[in-house]
Image: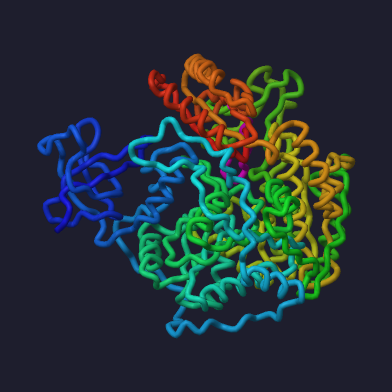
Amino acid sequence: MASTWFDLVFDIPADQAFTYRIDAKGESAVGKRAMVPFGKGSRDTLGFIIAERDAPPAGLSESAIKPIRRVVDAEPLFDAQDIALARWLAAYYLCGIGQAITAMIPSGRRMTEYPSFGNNDDEEFAAAALELSAEQQAALTMIVGTGDWGLGTRDSCSQSQRVDNPLRLQTNIPSPQSPVPSPSLFYLYGITGSGKTEVFLRAAEWMLQEGKSVIYLVPEIALTHQTAEVIGKRFGSAAAMLHSGMTPSERLAEWLRIRRGEARIVVGPRSAVFAPVRNLGLIVIDEEHDGSYKSGNTPRYHARQTAIRRCSVEGAKLVMGSATPSAEAWKLMAEGTIKRLDLSLRLAGGSLPDIKPVSLERAEGCLTDELKEEIRLTAQMKRQTILFLNRRGFAHLYHCPSCSYEQTCRRCSVSLTWHKSKRKALCHYCGYSEPPPSACPRCGSLEAGYRGFGTEMIEEEVRRTFPDLRIRRADADAAGKKGQLEETIAMFKAGLVDILLGTQMVAKGLNFPGVRLVGVILADTGLHLPDFRAAERTFSLIVQVAGRAGRYFPDGKVIVQTLRMGDPVITRSCTIDVAGFFDAELVQRKALNFPPYTRLIRFNARSKDPARADAAMRRLASLAVPLIPPDADMLGPAECPIGIINGNHRRQLILRGKSMGTLHAAARILLERYEQSRDSRVYLEVDVDPVSLL
């Protein structure tokens, strides 16, 4: 007999469920979405059915319970295991269960046909294209062997560290420190071009032959397509793809195909970690160091942390990989918590490129003489060049030397970037734009003008200097149209482009056989940022983009242009001294009491009224003081480094401690007390384990 009552949750910051009566057609079921009356005016709102019940909640009469108006889905999109993961996500990242489920499942309302990867109905997977080296074979044997390598993770707590949550909610959200089995954690640490992808694919093939499923995560959509192409050839219709570039209906179609077990290997960026695969055996996190694995919206989950949780609960293995691990992963490998598997050789005939730092101090324009000469030589050899600058637009600062005026966004505390192709100065945070001034708006000086350079200016100078070469730009502006980025990458890979100019999307994992030269236009753009991870990000970007050169030939060349020739981050990246960098960086992190030696929970208050933002943050700080655990402290309250975004004034407060368990307990109490009399005109964001403090 079908249940009469169902509990639903919504995409709101509330850790509670709401009970409704079954719909008139009797289609209600756990795992489906439904339209129900909710909130002021009882407007139709999309909810998620997470439980069924035999009777109404205590104290609630049947007549007071509203019926479900319409069930959206013909078949369930999520099951009990997904709901359990959503409860953990809500508990760990301090958000509502409905917000967690919203992040997990596609938003499409109807299915459309989506082209599959091919036809491999007999499940006989294509043979691997490459023979494994001894290092690759040893790594693969370790991964698919006994697997009993679980020494715990950085979030597994001893019994003494676990705390009872005094505010355990009636919806039975589990404590994020609930004991779970320790997963098998492996890390493929190897230079760029050392064959990490082939080991990932062989491990995936082994899992599929054992009847298990695989999730393969990559940091960018551009990499999703490249990896999907390889996986599609290897696994055919057993493969599926999930990413934000697909329409909601396309994602829904793939999601249901995965749920039905028709696809058993899923490739995609961050959100693919939630793919509803059956019998999960392996999660791969390629380019583990990449910051895009951390969500910038609620719930602010990290795919790595979520993958560890899924592997723990479902008995799967987690394999990460990068040439430049995150500081957290490097420390855990050194401690033995993660099993490190080394790959030290380039396998396609290439070798590590010759990397040379070059000063930009006396350069005329954006390109030094050294870089220009190498571009000419590379073109004469019928080879290709990548030019990298992590700053789009034409110029990033309008400055008046007479009165020090700077053109800034009216809604954000940042400079406007001049986009010559769009003929306007644009804010990269809120989208505000205005025409460029013909003279200084403050003093009228004609000496005022734009300074610095972005990818547009580089493109213009490169075209002027090398008019006979074929040039394409790959950044967020140039790749605005659907499929344009994929087209550019395909053309470059096919040898139809001589110079590829781009931002960080050309620095991550892409494999181009014809590339001889990589030019880093300005290596130190991120070093001045007021963030404790600035050096780590800069080092990783330089090493990663340098790794695009010489992957198939032993004559790769990298020119690193810089204004900080003596900076240790620049010198170590030019020698690819990963161990030396982390030895120095971790000493500094430990001295400053920052991750990976501590854990952080960041509270960010924003409001149109700066006085309200200040008052809310002062109140939050006063509530936090008596709750701070003995092994923790509080940073702030203070203005965020970027103090205004889109007219919202931003203030932050950070709880920092040795144990996430004690920080969570304090944060939960703090949030409940704050909510009792919060200012409705102030929005409070909570970020557990933030990767940026800007």
In the image, 426: left or right of 39?
right
> Which image quadrant for residue 452?
top right
**Residue 683, position as x, y percentages in the image:** 45, 27
Viewport quadrant of the C terminus: top right
The residue nearer to you, when weighing 52 against 216, is: 52
Q: Does residue 516 appear anywhere in the picture?
A: yes
Residues shaded magenta = 413-424
Q: Residue at x 24, y 61 (%)?
A: 74
Q: Residue at x 60, y 72 (%)?
A: 203
**Residue 548, position as x, y percentages in the image:** 74, 62
**Residue 378, position as x, y percentages in the image:** 82, 66
Q: Is residue 688 above or below residue 673?
A: below
Viewport quadrant of the N terminus: bottom left
Residue 423 belongs to magenta span: yes
In the image, 437: left or right of 670?
right
**Residue 603, position as x, y percentages in the image:** 53, 29
Q: Is residue 126 above or below residue 428?
A: below
The residue nearer to you, when weighing 595 against 311, is: 311
Q: Does residue 468 appear anywhere in the picture?
A: no
The residue nearer to you, when weighing 248 against 75, is: 75
